[in-house]
Image (cartoon, helix red, strand yellow):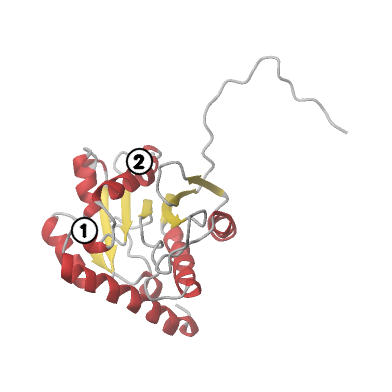
Amino acid sequence: MDPARQAPHARTLARILDSIEDRFATLGASPQGLWWPNARDLALRYEVMLRPLLDAQPAQRPTLLDFGCGAGFLPDWLAANGLLDRVDYTGIDISAPVLAAARARWPGLRFLQADILAAGVPAPLQGGRYDAVLACGIFTCRFANSHAEMLAYAEASLAALWRSTRHGLAFNAMSKHVDWEREDLLHWGADEVMRFCRAQLARHVEMRAAYGLWECSFHVWREARQPESRLPAAWRDVATA
């Protein structure tokens, strides 16, 4: 990482870490203990964000990176939906106590402690890049950081994750189309997200906002997602001047 950006990044990450670990120490390995409002909406986010990533994978057992894995809630959801054996899972987080809980809850899975902006994204066990990367809820709160600080962290993190993605990346962002913008959340406008993705990641971007939460989810793909359809026989391209 550029030394000139190291100090601001370290401060941003320290504020995130302090908020997470203080909350976790009080409420433990529960959705609320990691700042999720409730369990139902967390499951809904996983369905909306992860299912398209898995359905699009050409690999029989794709490598999946869960960035900001917390206490291992995504493996819980995968197991409950009969999907855990379909993926080669890796979870990454920055918090040692939270990762300790994840490892205790899922001792057979791979959980790593890593600051991806300082040391890079750890590769899958077999090397190369991950087939799919999920960052659920990682860029929605800003805690004690300013909007500019958290936005810089989100953009740098997504760029690093994209370099480690073979097929697709999914993340969510708080909408600006709300009754009011909360001071502790990163409200990142959809146009701004699209502009960033197309400039820094790829132009094959999908946005979903119909699932009833005050946020949008985004899927970024290496290749265009073009559904099959039959071309009407009467259609013919003609030369234009």
Other-residue count near label 1 (Cα within 10 Å), few / some / many at <14 / 14–19 / ≥20: some
Where 77 falls versus 3 (above or below)?
A: above
Where 124 falls versus 94 (above or below)?
A: above
Query: What's the amino acid at mark 1?
Result: Arg
Where 224 falls versus 183 (above or below)?
A: above
Where 230 falls versus 93 (above or below)?
A: above
Residue 131, percent from left and from top: 37, 49
Q: Nearer the viewer, residue 15 or 61?
A: 15
- Residue at disc 2, secondary structure: helix
Residue that appears at 31% across and 62% down: 68
Residue 93, percent from left and from top: 28, 66
Q: Earlier in the sequence, mark 2 or mark 1?
A: 2
Q: Nearer the viewer, residue 164 or 11?
A: 11
Is disc 2 in contact with disc 1, using a CB cutoff of under 8 Å? no
Q: Residue furthest top?
A: 233
| Residue that carries the numbered disc 1 in the rendered image | 110
| Residue that carries the numbered disc 2 in the rendered image | 51
Residue that appears at 45% across and 65% down: 186
Residue 179, percent from left and from top: 48, 56
Circle on res. 20: none
Query: What's the amino acid at mark 2?
Result: Arg
On the rendered image, what quadrant is the C terminus found in?
A: top right
Q: Residue furthest front?
A: 179
- Does the rendering let one see residue 85? yes
Residue 33, percent from left and from top: 21, 63
Q: Nearer the viewer, residue 211 or 236?
A: 211
- Residue at disc 1, secondary structure: strand
- Does the rendering let one see residue 107? no
Q: Give the distance between the C-alpha atoms of the residues marked 2 and 1, in whole angstroms.
A: 21 Å
Other-residue count near label 2 (Cα within 10 Å), few / some / many at <14 / 14–19 / ≥20: few
